[in-house]
Image: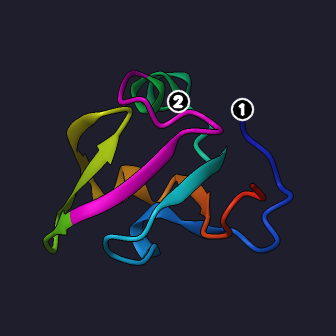
């Protein structure tokens, strides 16, 4: 689920704190990294929020769970801040 069309997207590591975002693309190319991202529930279409952050990690809410994600991994997850039409 990688891709190069990233217009309007930002890495999860740069997403606004406590605002809902939607996972759109993964930029990781190594199968183990892509698998780890999927295991955390960060698949395209997932709605997530950054709850806390430090210099090395983010605590996010994803699929009704709190998950710790390292910043390097979060940089491989591209998100969209636009709200979906009702």
Q: Along the horizontal axis of the image, is 66 left or right of 84?
A: left
* Residue beneath disc 2: 34
Is residue 77 rendered magenta in the image?
no
Is residue 43 rendered magenta in the image?
yes
Mark 2 or mark 1: name the one nearer the start of the chain: 1
Residue 66: percent from left, percent from top? 20, 40
Location of residue 82 by image quarter: bottom right
Residue 61: percent from left, percent from top? 29, 47
**Quarter of the rendering occupied by the N terminus:** top right
Location of residue 67 by image quarter: top left
Location of residue 17 by image quarter: bottom left
Residue 13: percent from left, percent from top? 40, 67
Q: Circle 1 — which element? A: loop
Bounds of the magenta span? 39-51
Q: Along the horizontal axis of the image, is 31 left or right of 18?
A: right
Residue 53: percent from left, percent from top? 18, 69
Cβ–Cβ under 8 Å for marks 2 and 1: yes
Q: Which mark is residue 62?
A: none
* Residue beneath disc 1: 1
Q: Residue at x 35, y 30 (%)?
A: 40
Q: For the residues marked 2 and 1, what is the alpha-carbon distance in whole angstroms?
A: 8 Å
Q: Looking at the image, which is closer to me, 6 or 64?
A: 64
**Quarter of the rendering occupied by the C terminus:** bottom right
| Residue, far right | 5
Q: Looking at the image, which is closer to me, 45 or 83?
A: 83
Q: Along the horizontal axis of the image, is 74 left or right of 6?
A: left
Q: Residue at x 55, y 31 (%)?
A: 30
Q: Looking at the image, which is closer to me, 74 or 8?
A: 8
Q: Residues within 10 Å of mark 1 (few under 14, many from 20)?
A: few
Q: Is residue 3 above or below residue 85?
A: above
């Amino acid at each position: 689920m990688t891709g190069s069309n990233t217009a309007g997207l930002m890495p999860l590591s740069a997403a606004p704190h406590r605002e809902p975002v939607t996972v759109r693309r993964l930029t990781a190319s190594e199968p183990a990294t892509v698998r780890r991202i999927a295991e955390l529930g960060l698949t395209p279409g997932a709605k997530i929020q950054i709850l806390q952050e430090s210099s090395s990690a983010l605590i996010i809410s994803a699929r009704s769970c709190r998950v710790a994600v390292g910043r390097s991994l979060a940089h491989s997850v591209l998100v969209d801040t636009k709200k979906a039409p009702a």
